[in-house]
Amino acid sequence: MSTREQLSDFLAQIERRAFKQAMFAVRDEHVALDIVQDAMLKLAERYGDKPAEEFPMLFHRILQNTILDNFRRQKVRSFWLTLFSSFSQKNAEEEFDPLDVLEDKENASQPQLPDAALQQDQVLTAIEEALQHLPARQREAFLLRYWDQLDTAETAAAMGCSEGSVKTHCSRATHALALMLKEKGIDLS
């Protein structure tokens, strides 16, 4: 059984990565924050008494389910809004650019030299852009394995699929990212 401190420590460690993962999925800062908050609350309320070793897998599964729930709600809302929008005039709304939100100005790993910091920032931005173009399952597997550093078994449990599927998704994601980055003149090998 875990303690409140263990749960609190886990949530503090996972919050930034969970936010980034939600941002990649929904591309809206406010919605991503709501998703992460809902996932954290669900973990605390329903599984707070589980062993601390189980928190990563449980949380990632809850986070992915919360993201899917958000998409389902959006689909229903857009259906009704589409029906009712034909009765009203269309207003031009501002377009949302997810790249405005993905900046990480508090990144402690930034090099001290300005030119190196700029180069690293450009590479990270290119990687984040490329991640957005991956299919959802590939992006999820890639982020869980390489961003959250879960092993293959933990990733498979979090995604609800086999270890072979995780390996396939990760391999395809890695190759696709390498091609997209190479097209932009970035070679990370």
Image (cartoon, rainbow, N blue to C red):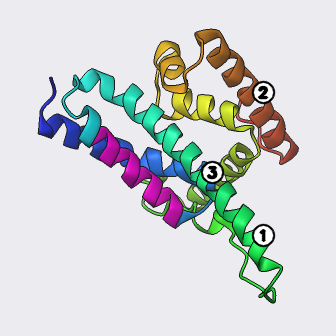
Judge whether residue 61 can be spotted in this image.
Answer: yes
Residue 37 among magenta residues: yes
Q: Is residue 88 left or right of residue 75?
A: right
Q: Give the residue at mark 1.
A: 82
Horizontal side of residue 8 vs 27, given as left or right: left
Where is residue 172? Give x, y as percent: 76, 24
Image height check: is 138 above or below 36? above
| Highlighted magenta segment, given as a residue range | 30-44
Q: Marks 1 and 2, Cα distance to the nearest angstrom? A: 38 Å
Which quadrant of the figure contains the N terminus?
Answer: top left
What element does badge 2 sit on? helix
Residue 175, which numbered label? 2
> Residue at image x 79%, y 32%?
176
Residue underneath mark 3 = 71
Residue drawn at (65%, 36%) of the image: 139
Q: Nearer the viewer, mark 1 or mark 2?
A: 1
**Residue 112 in sight:** no
Answer left or right for 15 relative to 75. left
| Residue type, label 2 | His
Amino acid type at image mark 3 = Phe
Q: In front: 75, or 3?
A: 75
Residue 78's image quarter? bottom right
Q: What type is the residue that disc 1 sits on? A: Thr
